[in-house]
Amino acid sequence: MGYVWDFFAVARNADILLAGLGQTMLLSVCGIAVGVAIGGVLAAMRLSGRRTLSWPALAFTEFYRNTPPLVHFFWFFYGLPMAFGLTLPPFAAALAALGVQSAAFFAEVFRGGILSVETGQWEAGRALGMGRARLMRRIILPQAARRMAAPFVERSFELVKTTTLAAALAFHETIYSAMVIVTQTYRPLEVYTVVAGLFFVVLFSASQLAEWLEARGRRAGAR
Amino acid sequence: MPTIAMPELQFGEVFANIDLFLEACGLTLALWAVALAAGLSGGLLVGLARLSPRRWIAWPARGYVELFRNTPVLVQLIWFYYALPVLSGIQLPAFAAAALALSLNASAYCAEIYRGGIQSVAAGQWEAGRALGMGRLRLLRRIILPLAVRRMVPAFTNRAVELAKNTSVASIITVHELMYTARLFSSQNYIPMETFTVVAMIYFLLIYPFTLASYALERRFAAGRA
Amino acid sequence: MTVAGDVVLQVEDLHKSFGSTEVLKGIDLSVRRGERIAILGSSGSGKSTLLRCLNVLEMPTRGRLILDGEAVGKPAAGGATRYREAELNRLRARVGMVFQQFNLFPHMTALENVMEGPLSVLGRSRAEARRTAQRHLERVGLGGKADAHPARLSGGQQQRVAIARALAMDPEVLLFDEPTSSLDPELVGEVLGVINDLSEDGRTMLLVTHELGFAYHFATRILFLHEGRILEDGPPEQVLKSPREERTRRFLDRFTAFRF
């Protein structure tokens, strides 16, 4: 006797699942924004040439790059607020954990891109009498941005996948929504297969799009 | 005067029970080792399959790799623990489900490392080997893989680090590894801040040597190329 | 107003070390306005380092730099000098540099490369920067390549754009750091031709080069550096034809193809 699939159980609850997907997207976009902002500061600190700035930034990025994100989700949701007698909503805790954790990775993306620009470019700018900030804005960043694009997209996809850990904080993103549907329909196979399919479709098509844009950018750059 | 009182932290309580956490590391390490071993061996097969000129071999391999790289590891773990039994009729223990999911995940990522490494070997090496009359398999074993391995080792070390972090997700499907133990301990003792800080440190100590090794290998590779 | 022939750039007791290796061991040099100085020497003699110290792309370990009678930087302990960034930027805006590797900005067209300095450092208007940039590109014979990106230009063309970029700042002193050393032999001539044409401007120029024949015709003065010190300093006739030092003679003998 074969198993009788029933995807209607999922279809009937599509609204819950799609709402969850919406929350996943929201958390992802906010996470990228926070991660990029903090990551930019960390990269600037590491490139400052001052040990009092670069060493703390190095310690920070190494710590968050070498510890599981799930620990940070719990640390921000239970640990930090309870120590101060507060409570944080799951979204805020997840965003904080995600932002700080991904910042460590974004910082490396930015730093790597900037360091990949040849020293001759710095020297040519300085020889014209350009100040550090202007040189960075006019000469270095436009060149670095092109090289950062691919690793930036890759890190962003990692971040989207990491948002699912917020389910462990009872945040109503895609997986948590799926779990809710499972408790109502007792159809884990269909529900979780659809969830996997959803993530696959979103991430795979986005990565194909990014690849296409990158190839186009390369062609434009070779002009 | 500060408006928020500085919390009184009770790290002593966590350290008094440190053996609990160290024991749990055993399962974390086991999960890590199984998945890494499976990834390194399975990844080679899948990587070679992806390079096959035969479409009916290369395309399913690509599908497998893309599927596991484009879905969250949590979804994979949940699927193998909660969904697969419905299909197979066999309920896997949590550890087995986690080990299976993480192994398949690691194989997909390692396959891409093998593929990239093999493709990075100059075409001249293939031609030189063929000119000697070597078969494809022998050529791969004697010439291509030894050349590619230097480029792949830093990437594998990196993957090992990501994998170690992924093992913590197994706590969500109730594998009693380090993260699960931490959640249990913190909810029983109401000291989550201290617990998760210490556990983060334990993870860091487990993982960081691999990162340092990958830095050293990258430096050596960069120097060797110059 | 300054008079032609006065000292525009003065270097006093310049030292430069990289780690424990001392590359420049005390250089004293007065450059007069309008002089064209070729700096010769074998590799490792410190000639490029000297040039790069003149616009402080390399920070001198010790010594003083005086541009137009004004000392650059503030004296610090041990004969060293402290430089403030703003001050260095002003200095570099007045001392142009052409690099061995061209170092054109790859994300800008030839015209934009030449416009960049006047636009963002001198604060010129876009229209004015564009006009002068076009004029300088025409001067180096590349008026028709204004919209080309560096990747589309030959090495010789890239170096000519780089010369136009330096000229657009109207620098008091123009430095050339082995401008033809990374060019294919057949492209060397067009770049040297452009540099030679600049002689008529009366601009002060310092050129590090291995092209002895060009140095002989172009320069009004030749320096020969050896192990971080100036060994010879005089007019081309004297330094190249009857050098005082044995070291210089041996250096010149190695260029067997060089005949006057």
Image (cartoon, rainbow, N blue to C red):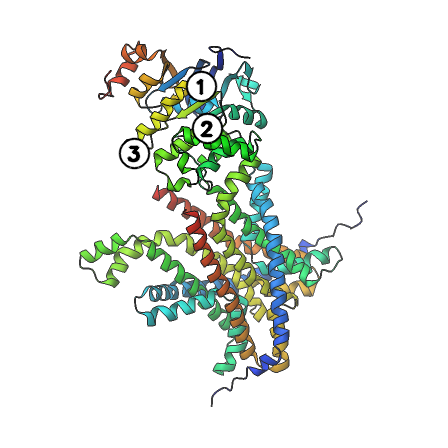
Answer above or below: position of C32 versus C22: above
User: Where residue A108 appears, x then y in whole percent?
Assistant: 52, 48
**Side of A86 where C181 appears, left or right:** left
Circle 3 residues within 10 Å: few <14, some 14–19, many ≥20: few
Q: Which amino acid does label 1 sit on?
A: Arg
**Side of C156 where A161 appears, left or right:** right
Residue B15: numbered disc: none
Mark 1 vs mark 3: give the one in front.
1
Which residue carries the number 1 mark?
C203
Discs 1, 2: same chain: yes
Answer above or below: position of C14 versus C110: above
Answer above or below: position of A49 versus C8: below
Mark 3 vs mark 2: give the one in front.
2
Which residue carries the number 2 mark?
C166
The chain ID associated with circle 1 is C
Question: Who comes first in sequence, dot 3 or dot 2?
Answer: 2
Q: Are marks 1 and 3 in contact (CB under 8 Å)?
A: no
Report if residue B142 is visible in the image: yes
Closer to the camera in the image, B85 or B178: B85
Which residue carries the number 3 mark?
C184
Q: Distance between the residues labelled 3 and 2?
A: 22 Å
For residue B133, what is the image quadrant? bottom left
Question: Who comes first in sequence, dot 1 or dot 3?
Answer: 3
User: Where residue B41 appears, x then y in whole percent?
Assistant: 37, 64
Closer to the camera in the image, A30 or C141: C141
Closer to the camera in the image, A125 or A169: A125
For residue A57, what is the image quadrant? top right
User: Where residue B92 appears, x then y in whole percent?
Assistant: 50, 77
Q: What element carries label 2?
A: helix
Q: Which amino acid does label 2 sit on?
A: Ala
